[in-house]
Structure formats: structure tokens, C-alpha cells
Image (cartoon, rainbow, N blue to C red):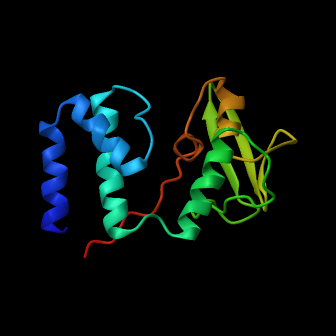
């Protein structure tokens, strides 16, 4: 990382909230949204790096938008995110919950549980348990570990 960027990031810790808000206005061209020191430091640090090295590419921004829509249960987009953790279509995921075996079938565009179609494994896990779960964790699916270099 560039020494100039590192120096700028290091100075954020020593700034007062008033100074952070002034830095915000300089970098964003608008008033700071709140007085949270942690928020201002983190967001300004990101902005400094973004301006120096560039922000996320178009494909990354698209993926983030799709993820945000999925989290907020917005069905504005026709494209569904293809998660690399998803098993092959037709795979049966079996999990015992409260003494009852639960079976989910992986579909091309979602998951089938008890004849009902779900867009995500998390939605299936929520239907089964009544609480929020990470669906991949609930069904024991893990992403591949990064290969050591």
C-alpha cells in the first residue's frame, strides 16, 4: 500500500470528530451523516483508498446490488445470484431438526422443501426452524478453503 495512503489513514485516528466531519465534506462533497467516530473513520478510510486505487469494478458492484436485493427480499431483478456453494441441481440435502429428517432438493433456480419453492437455503432454514440461519451452515455446506500459496 502506498505510504501516502498509509499516512493519511494513520492520521484519521488522531483527528477529532469535528475534523473527521470536515474531512468527510472534503471527500464526499456533502455533510457527514452522523457523529459516530467509528463510522466516520471507517468510511473516510475506505474513500481515501477508493479514490487512490479505484472502487469496485462493474461486475462487483452488480453482484453487491444483487446481494442487497436478495437480503432485502426485493424481486426487481430477473437475474438470480449463482452461488458457487450451491450443489448440483437435483442434489438432496438432508438435515435432522428436532428429531425430524428434513429433505431439500436443489433446483436450477432455488430449492424445494415439502413441495414449496424457496429462493435461498436461508429461507428454507428459517421455514424449518422459525429463526434466522445461514442456510449453507444449517445444511453443512462450506465454501472451499483457500489454497495456501
Between 91 and 124, the residue placed more toward the observer is 124
Residue drawn at x 66%, y 63% is 82
The answer to which quarter of the image holds residue 43 is: top left
Most foreground residue, 125 or 49: 49
Q: Is residue 41 above or below residue 126?
A: below
Residue shown at 36% from the left, 50% from the top: 27
Q: Quadrant of residue 12?
A: top left
Q: Is residue 13 left or right of residue 18?
A: left
Of 19 and 149, which appears nearest the observer? 19
x and y, in percent, of residue 68 in the image:
61, 46
Expressed as whole percent of the image width and height from the top left, the position of residue 25 reads 37, 42
Residue found 58% across the figure and 44% down from its top: 139
Image quarter of residue 18: top left
Task: Residue 102: give x, y in percent of width and height.
Answer: 70, 37
Residue 69 placement (x, y as % from top left): 68, 46
The answer to whether residue 24 is visible is yes
* View extreme (bottom): residue: 149
**Circle count:** 0
**Residue 51 position (above or below residue 66):** below
In this rendering, the answer to whether 15 lies above or below 44 is above
Name the side, left or right, on which 23 lies relative to 141.
left
- Residue 61 in the image: above or below residue 37: below
Farthest-out residue, right = 115
Q: Is residue 135 left or right of residue 36?
A: right
Please state, as top left, top right, bottom left or bottom right, where the N terminus lies in the image.
bottom left
Quadrant location of the C terminus?
A: bottom left
In this rendering, does residue 121 appear at all?
A: no
Amino acid at each position: 500500500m502506498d505510504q501516502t495512503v498509509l499516512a493519511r489513514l494513520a492520521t484519521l485516528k488522531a483527528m477529532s470528530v469535528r475534523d473527521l466531519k470536515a474531512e468527510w465534506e472534503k471527500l464526499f462533497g456533502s455533510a457527514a451523516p452522523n457523529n459516530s467516530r467509528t463510522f466516520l473513520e471507517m468510511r473516510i478510510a475506505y474513500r481515501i483508498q477508493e479514490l487512490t486505487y479505484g472502487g469496485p469494478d462493474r461486475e462487483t458492484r452488480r453482484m453487491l446490488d444483487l446481494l442487497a436485493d436478495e437480503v432485502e427480499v426485493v424481486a426487481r431483478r430477473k437475474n438470480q445470484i449463482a452461488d458457487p456453494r450451491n450443489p448440483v441441481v437435483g442434489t438432496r440435502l438432508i438435515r435432522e431438526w428436532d428429531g425430524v429428517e428434513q429433505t431439500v432438493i436443489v433446483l436450477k433456480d432455488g430449492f424445494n422443501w415439502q413441495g414449496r419453492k424457496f429462493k435461498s437455503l436461508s429461507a428454507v432454514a428459517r421455514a424449518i426452524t422459525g429463526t434466522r440461519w445461514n442456510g449453507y451452515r444449517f445444511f453443512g455446506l462450506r465454501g472451499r478453503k483457500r489454497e495456501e500459496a
